[in-house]
Image (tube, rainbow, N blue to C red):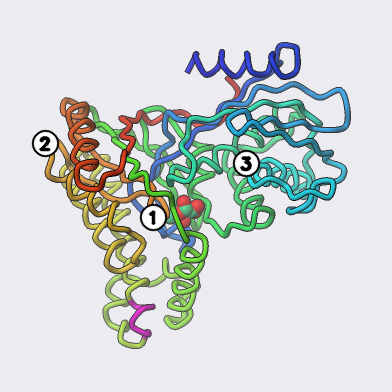
Amino acid sequence: MNSFRERVTQLFQDTFDEQPKFIVRAPGRVNLLGEHVDYNDGFVLPAAIDRAVWIAFTAAPSPHSTLVAVDLDERVSFSSETIPAKTDLDGKPLPHWAKYPVGCAWALNDAGYETPALNAVFTSDVPRGSGLSSSAAVEMAFISAWQALAGFEADAMARAQLGQRAENLYVGVNCGIMDQFASACGKRDHALFLDCRSLEWHTVPLPDGVAIVVADTAVPRSLSDSAYNERRSACEEAARLFGAKSLRDVSVAEFQRNKNKLPELVARRAQHVVEEIQRTEQAVFLLKQGNVRAFGRLMNECHESLRDLYEVSCPELDVMVRIARSLDGCYGARLTGAGFGGCTVNLVAHSEAEAFATGLASRYTRETDKNPSVYICRAEAGAGMV
Ligand code: GLA
C-alpha cells in the first residue's frame, strides 16, 4: 500500500509540480456469493479487495478540474458548472474512462452536493474488464475526493448510491448496487452481507485459515452489456408473471409450483435467481459458523447455476473452475461478477494457497494456451482518505 501512496504522490508532483494535499484509495471487489441478484432485491456477499484506485489531488486554483489517468496517459479538463454531455468535451468525444469521474460530478451536483474543482492524478491496480469492479472503484474514489474537498455529509451507503446513479444515468450501464457498495463499505478480513432491498448490511469475519484466491481467465468480458440487460429483462418479466414486485418476493417453493406458467428461457433465468437468493442466505449463516466446506459447496452450486440456468459462463471460466476443484485445499470455485469472461473466485485452505495459485495458473495455461493472473487476495477496507 505504501508503495502506491508514494507512486501516486510522485506522479502528482511530476504532473502539477507540487505536492498533493490529499490521497484517497478505493478498492475493487470480489463477490463470494449472490450473483445476479442485486437487481432482483436479493442478498449479496462481496468483499472489498487489496487492489485499488489511488487518487492524489488538490483543490484547483481555476474553475476547471483536471483529471489525469496516468495508466492510460490521458487527461481531461472540465468545469462542474458545465458538465460535458456524455459524448462531448469541447466538441470531442469524452474518453470512456472519463465518463466515470465526470458522471460522479454530475450525480453529486444533481443531488445538491458541491464538486469543487480539483487537480487529480489517478492510477489503479484493479485489472480492467475482469469483473473486479475497476469502474466502481474509480467512482468511489472520486466521490470520496469531492467529499473531502466539499465537506458534505454522506455516509458510505449514500456514496455507493451516488456512484450507482452516475453509472446508470451518466455512463449508461444498468448495474445494481453491489459493486459500489463493496468498494465503499469494505472491511479488512471481512465479507459484507447486504440486503439489496432494505440496504441493511453487516460485516462477516472471514474464518481463519482460508484464503480468497482470484483467478483471471485472461478472457475479456465480451458482449456483457447487452447480455446483462437481457438477463435483467428476463427477471423483470418473470416477476411480472408471478405478480411480484421482484423475484425476491418469489420463494423457491412458489417458483416450483408455478414455473410452468413461464416461457422456458424466462423460467431458467428466474430459477437461478430465486435459488441464489436462498443460497446466499444459507451461505452467510455457514460462514458465520466457520463451516467453509459447506460454504464452498454452495459456491460450486452457484457456478453450475450461472453456467446452466443463467448462461453467463464461458468455456475458459468453466475450465478454470474445473481445474481449481481438482487441486488440494480448494473448498469452492465459481465465476465471480457478471460473467462472460473475467475472473473466478476460489475459497482455499490458507496453507495450500500458494501451491494452489501456481498449480491453477500452470494447468490453465496448458489447457487453454492463455496466460492467467492468479491473486491471493486479502479483504480490505472500503474507500477513504489515507
Ligand atoms: C456486475 C454489476 C453488479 C451485479 C453483478 C452480477 O458486476 O455491476 O451490480 O449485478 O454484475 O452479480
Q: Quadrant of residue 152?
A: top right
Q: Is residue 266 magenta?
A: yes
The amino acid marked with disc number 3 is Arg
Q: Position of residue 289 (x, y in %)?
A: 22, 40
Q: How packed is label 3: few (under 14 Cα within 10 Å), some, or many (20 or more)?
A: many
Dot 3 or dot 1: first in sequence order is 3
Q: Is residue 164 left or right of residue 190?
A: right
CB atoms of marks 3 and 1 within 8 Å: no
Q: How many marks?
A: 3
- Secondary element type, mark 2: loop
Q: Is residue 363 left or right of residue 256?
A: left
Residue nearest the viewer, comparing 157 with 11: 11
Residue at image mark 3: 159
In front of the other: label 3 or label 1? 1
The amino acid marked with disc number 1 is Gly
- Dominant secondary structure of the residues highlighted in magenta in the image: helix
Q: Quadrant of residue 323?
A: top left
Residue at image mark 2: 328
Q: How far apart are labels 1 and 2 at the CA level?
A: 25 Å
- Secondary element type, mark 3: helix
Residue at image mark 1: 339
Q: Is residue 378 left or right of residue 286?
A: right
The amino acid marked with disc number 2 is Asp
What residue is shown at x 62% (from left), y 51% (from top)?
Answer: 167
- Secondary element type, mark 1: loop
Check mark 1 vs ligand 1: CB closer than 8 Å? yes or no. yes
Q: Is residue 118 above or below residue 8?
A: below
Q: Position of residue 69 (x, y in %)?
A: 64, 32
